[in-house]
Amino acid sequence: MHRNSVLIAGLLATAMAACGSEEDGGNEVGLNDGQGGCAGITNCLNLDVTTDTRLAAGDWILSPRNDGGYVTVASGVTLEIAPGTTIRGLTGAALIVPRGARIVAEGTEAEPIVFTSAKEEGSRAGGDWGGLLILGNAPVNEPSPHFEALPASDATGDYGGDDVADDSGILRYVRIEFAGFTYATDKEFNALTLCGVGNSTVIDYVQVHRGSDDGVELFGGTADLRHVISSQNQDDGFDTDFGWSGRTQFLVVQHINGQSSDPNGYESDNRPDGQDYNALPRTEPTIFNATLIGSASTPTSSRGAVLRRGTAGIYGNHIFASFKSSAVDVRDSATTQGFGARLAVQSSVFWSNAGGVNWQDESSGSANNDNGFEEAVAFMADALANVAVDPGLPAASTHLTAPSFQPASFLTGLTPPADGFFDTSATFIGGIGADDWTTGWASYPED
């Protein structure tokens, strides 16, 4: 019997027991047609979710629809997922929450909700399934925004609007593993993709792990995120585009498995290459308390942050450590012109990047893509209070299966903005302080 068949046969027994009881609110009616990838499996999704539905705790299979499409939550409908639930995606499967729909995946520290591969443990890898795609009605700077990995004829992929406070639901204590795949050249699903998602959406304690593309990518919107781990993803750790103006606090990017042509910790654009880099709303997030860890063994160039194409933002209390090519690379005059006014990295640590020198000189010859902007001078100006000192990260910060990101001692940085979102007591530099919020719910399987 095929290894996947063994796994699915085992899930069948669990699913039959877990689904449909009044106590846990399970309801499989209308979620699958018993065909294709759901043949013989009760706890299985291969139909669109068209009525408010709660998935009972237990193991579920996520399958492509029989027409090859992706399972989608209908507009006006809420999909709720019970704590402790595991959803295992088959090849070609993805879950889409479009404009007007909501997902309420609210796990707990003891019982996180896990989206993972349906392959047997030991044979899982990035790209096994598509990931989670959420689209909302918040502002973007794209005239007719449509998610890149869905056909233009599929209105499910439309996103954006004028509702800053749009609500797409809750992701809390959620892990997304082994996701992402390429739909067409330069058109990918990521582990977690947020398109035009508004700031009434709750995203807190979320881990994206071992995806084949970006860990998290935000296409515009105003979504706020807290307590996020992007671990061992193959392309960018945290990618922002199309006018995302949200906030993030407490972020760890363990970027030690980069395998794309240009995998970076942060990659931030205002608009795509060749378009109006000054389009509004501008990509201009505020991010405090983050640790980004790279690896000198990345097969291609890799930077702590690539900020380009008119992007902006305030990055405070960061650690950028051990990236192969450079700590931060700013590109394009539309970006450098905003330095100091709408773009700053401040009260942060740069350590052991680019072989220990932290910065590459990319301001001459064919590498001059920033009109001579000198990162080593600009980011080390006294007014920004950045330093090149050892942040005290443990050796286990690059461990594959049991990492730790908590420094031995804590450097003091800025007080985060007192705007009601940020924890203003987090005046330490880095993503983790005395409270290691990653313990108890995060996990780092290799396969």
Image: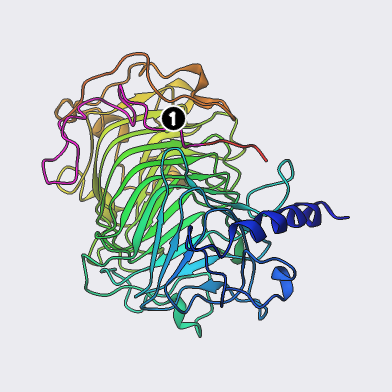
- Image coords of residue 421 (percent x, y): 18, 46
What residue is shown at x 33% (from left), y 72% (from top)?
A: 142
Would residue 360 be seen by someone viewing this image from the given angle?
A: no
Residue 330 image offset from top left, x and y in percent: 34, 44
Colour scheme:
rainbow
Residue nearer the viewer, 86 or 199: 86
Q: Which residue type does callout 1 highlight?
A: Thr
Magenta-drawn segment: 415-442
Magenta stretch: helix, strand or loop mostly: loop
Q: Nearer the viewer, residue 53 or 253?
A: 53
Q: Which residue is mark 1?
A: 439
Q: Residue furthest right?
A: 1
* Mark 1 element type: loop
How many numbered discs? 1
- Above or below 58: residue 418: above
Q: Is residue 425 magenta?
A: yes
444, 157: nearer the viewer: 444
On the picture, is 117 further left or further right than 244? right
* Residue, far bottom: 153
